[in-house]
Image: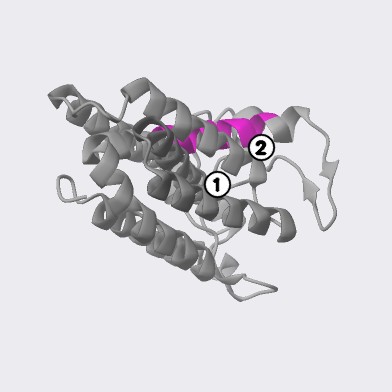
């Protein structure tokens, strides 16, 4: 969006944190692994930077990781594909919902997604599917929960405004990503579901047909500050894990 530069903000912050996690990984860096694991930071390094999931949240007490994990990524292709979706969906969401409210939806959706994934990983057994199984994640990162939140917000806007174009396009994108998540192994579908619900509910709460207010920008700044404070606190708390 033109107001806050939503897409450059997300791309820039995510890219910087990804580069720092690669540098910090040291010998645990996976240069060329199996499947999509190309330039993948070490798992312990991601944990130190603020990865979420049932292990950090419940075993280590890192409840703040539901804020930081959205800005982290597990491989080169992971961040490339997620940032492509942010670049495609972000401007549309900022145009119809507003840039400040888009930031809030992005952050809150990530929190909802990683919270649901952590709860499922802790309390739910894996649910077998045709090609894979539906399960919560012990360790999870990525912007996809927040991306699903943007799609949920766009779908709600399309319903509220009567715009069949916005509703249909967002619904098609959400369906494509949902099917991809069910077919591909290792995808955190609970985070996707939680993010979608969070984005839809936040859009309904804001009523996107109304104009943004000044306090929306203040809340957006608080959300961003809380996200990066969570990352900093995670590094402070789990510094010994760096590079393991």
Residue 220 picture location, percent across and down: 25, 32
Which label was assigned to residue 47?
A: 1
Q: Which mark is residue 55?
A: 2
Is the residue 227 above or below the residue 205 in the image?
Answer: below
* Label 1: how many Cα within 10 Å (few below 14, some 14–19, many 20+): many
Residue 102's place in the image compared with 78, above or below, is above
Q: Which residues are magenta?
A: 108-119
| Front-most of residues 88 and 82 | 88
Q: Give yes or no for contact between labels 1 and 2 (Cβ–Cβ under 8 Å).
A: yes
Point out residue 127 in the picture as x, y percentages from the top left corner.
Answer: 83, 40
The image quarter containing residue 180 is bottom right
Q: Is residue 112 magenta?
A: yes
Residue 211, given in percent of the width and then of the height, sits at 18, 28
Please tell me how crowded label 2 is: few (under 14), some (14-19), or many (20+) other residues with Cα within 10 Å: some
Magenta stretch: dominant secondary structure = helix
**Residue 132 appearing in the image:** yes
In the depicted structure, whether residue 235 falls above or below residue 83:
above
């Amino acid at each position: 969006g033109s107001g806050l530069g939503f897409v450059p903000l997300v791309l820039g912050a995510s890219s910087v944190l990804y580069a720092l996690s690669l540098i910090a990984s040291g010998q645990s860096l996976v240069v060329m692994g199996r499947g999509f694991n190309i330039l993948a930071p070490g798992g312990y390094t991601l944990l130190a930077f603020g990865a979420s999931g049932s292990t950090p949240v419940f075993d280590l007490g890192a409840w703040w990781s539901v804020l930081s994990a959205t800005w982290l990524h597990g491989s080169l292709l992971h961040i490339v594909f997620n940032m492509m979706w942010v670049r495609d969906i972000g401007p549309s969401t900022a145009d119809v919902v507003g840039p400040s409210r888009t930031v809030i939806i992005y952050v809150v959706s990530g929190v909802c997604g990683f919270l649901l994934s952590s709860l499922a990983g802790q309390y739910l057994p894996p649910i077998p599917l045709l090609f894979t199984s539906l399960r919560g994640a012990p360790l999870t990162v990525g912007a996809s929960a927040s991306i699903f939140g943007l799609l949920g917000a766009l779908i709600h806007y399309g319903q509220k405004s009567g715009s069949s174009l916005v509703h249909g396009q967002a619904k098609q994108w959400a369906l494509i990503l949902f099917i991809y998540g069910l077919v591909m192994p290792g995808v955190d579908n609970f985070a996707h579901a939680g993010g979608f619900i969070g984005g839809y509910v936040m859009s309904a709460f804001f009523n996107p047909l109304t104009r943004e207010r000044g306090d929306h920008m203040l809340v957006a700044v608080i959300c961003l500050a809380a996200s990066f404070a969570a990352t900093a606190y995670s590094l402070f708390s789990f510094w010994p894990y760096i590079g393991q």
